Structure formats: C-alpha cells, structure tokens
Image: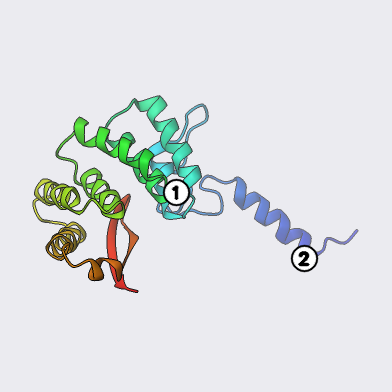
C-alpha cells in the first residue's frame, strides 16, 4: 500500500491544528489565546478580536457573555454599545454608552462613541459637549477624539448654514478597539 503525498499533507495539517495554538500561533491573531480545559476565554478579548474581524453580531454575543461572567461594568457596557453602533442600532448603542459614562465619567472611548452617535442623529450641540468630555478625560492624548471635537465644533459653527449641512455625509470610521471617528465628505 502506497501513501500519497496529499494524504501525508492532510495528516500533518490535522496534527498542526491539534497542537496548542492551532494553526495560528500568533498571540495577536483573531482567535482567543490558549485556554486551559474547563476554562472559558475572556469574552471581552474574544469580542474585541471579532470586532476587528468585522464580525459585529458575534462580538455582541461575546460581550454579552463577558457581562454575564464579569458583571456590567464600564468595559462591558461600552463594548456592548460599540458593537450595537457597528450594527447600526443607534438607540441601543446610545443607551449602553450613556450607562457606561454614568458608571465611569472618565472613560474616553465611551464618551467618544456616544458623541459619534449624537453626530449621526444630528444632535450637534450635545455631541460637541460629549466630545469635549472625551477629550478632557483623555487629557488630549487622542488625535481621533481631537478630530471629532474639531469636526463637531465646526459643524456647530456652521449649523445656521443649512446648505452646508445638506452637503455633508458623515461616516463612522473605526479606530482601535471600539473607538470611532467621524469623517465628513462633501456629497
């Protein structure tokens, strides 16, 4: 009996998948880090990796599991809000992010993402105030938050010019783990 090279390759591939780390040995890959038998992966880590991979519905499920195991804290509430934001569920996202900033008023990502929602809804005045809070909580260290604040303030200044408002198209751009930036482009 002769073993074909394809069979040998398949056996090696299957064995590699069974080793610790599987086929993806990179600790920064989208898969959860090695988890001991009987333990579960951290839902926040799994959710962040799923968000990075564009799997927002699965990320939301991972964040909900994290909330069930860790409790509702600023991290889990902000993550659930960010996943809902990516899914276009602005009402749900806003409720979760408002709860997150009530829990911890010094958490810049939650403030920033709340500002993005408010800009999308056309609530420019409140959005600019929210971006100010995000900027202050971050001590001015985030270029993305600074850019969002500048955009909101410019939009607020030009709010009397309705033609300018009608020619603006806002897009949510993801930056980092759960942070979003508004990008405006003339139509």
Q: Secondary structure at mark 2?
A: helix
Left/right placement of residue 71 relative to residue 125 reads right
Q: Residue 179 location in percent, x, y?
A: 29, 52
* Residue lying furthest bottom: 186
Reply above or below: 49 against 152: above
* Quadrant of the snapshot with the C terminus: bottom left
Quadrant of the image occupied by residue 75: top left
Q: Residue 40 location in percent, x, y?
A: 47, 31
Q: Nearer the viewer, residue 174 or 33?
A: 174
Q: Secondary structure at mark 1?
A: loop
User: Which class describes the residues within 10 Å of circle 1: few (<14), some (14-19), or many (20+)?
Assistant: some
Q: Nearer the viewer, residue 103 or 152?
A: 152
Q: Residue 141 location in percent, x, y?
A: 12, 56
Circle on res. 87: 1
* Image label count: 2
Quadrant of the image occupied by residue 91: top left
Q: Residue 123 location in percent, x, y?
A: 23, 50
Which residue is found at the position 74% from the left and 59% from the top? 8
Q: Nearer the viewer, residue 56 or 156?
A: 156
Which residue is found at the position 40% from the left and 32% from the top? 66
Q: Nearer the viewer, residue 31 or 140?
A: 140
Left/right placement of residue 16 relative to residue 73 reads right
* Quadrant of the snapshot with the N terminus: bottom right
* Residue lying furthest right: 1
Which residue is found at the position 29% from the left and 66% from the top? 183
Which residue is found at the position 15% from the left and 66% from the top? 158
Per the image, the residue denoted by label 2 is: 5
Question: How far apart are the alpha carbons under marks 2 and 1?
Answer: 46 Å
């Amino acid at each position: 009996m002769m073993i074909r090279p394809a069979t040998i390759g398949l056996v090696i591939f299957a064995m590699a998948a069974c080793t610790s780390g599987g086929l993806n040995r990179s600790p920064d890959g989208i898969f959860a880090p090695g988890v001991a038998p009987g333990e579960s992966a951290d839902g926040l880590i799994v959710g962040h990796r799923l968000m990075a991979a564009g799997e927002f519905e699965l990320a939301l499920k991972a964040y909900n599991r994290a909330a069930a195991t860790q409790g509702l804290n600023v991290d889990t509430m902000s993550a659930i809000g960010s996943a809902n934001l990516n899914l276009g569920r602005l009402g749900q996202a806003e409720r979760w992010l408002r709860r997150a900033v009530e829990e911890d008023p010094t958490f810049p990502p939650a403030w920033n993402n709340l500002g993005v929602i408010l800009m999308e809804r056309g609530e420019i005045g409140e959005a600019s105030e929210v971006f100010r809070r995000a900027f202050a909580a971050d001590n001015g260290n985030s270029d993305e938050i600074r850019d969002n604040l500048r955009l909101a303030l410019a939009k607020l200044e030009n709010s009397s010019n309705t033609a300018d408002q009608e020619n603006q198209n806002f897009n949510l751009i993801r930056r980092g783990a759960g942070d979003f930036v508004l990008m405006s482009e003339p139509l």
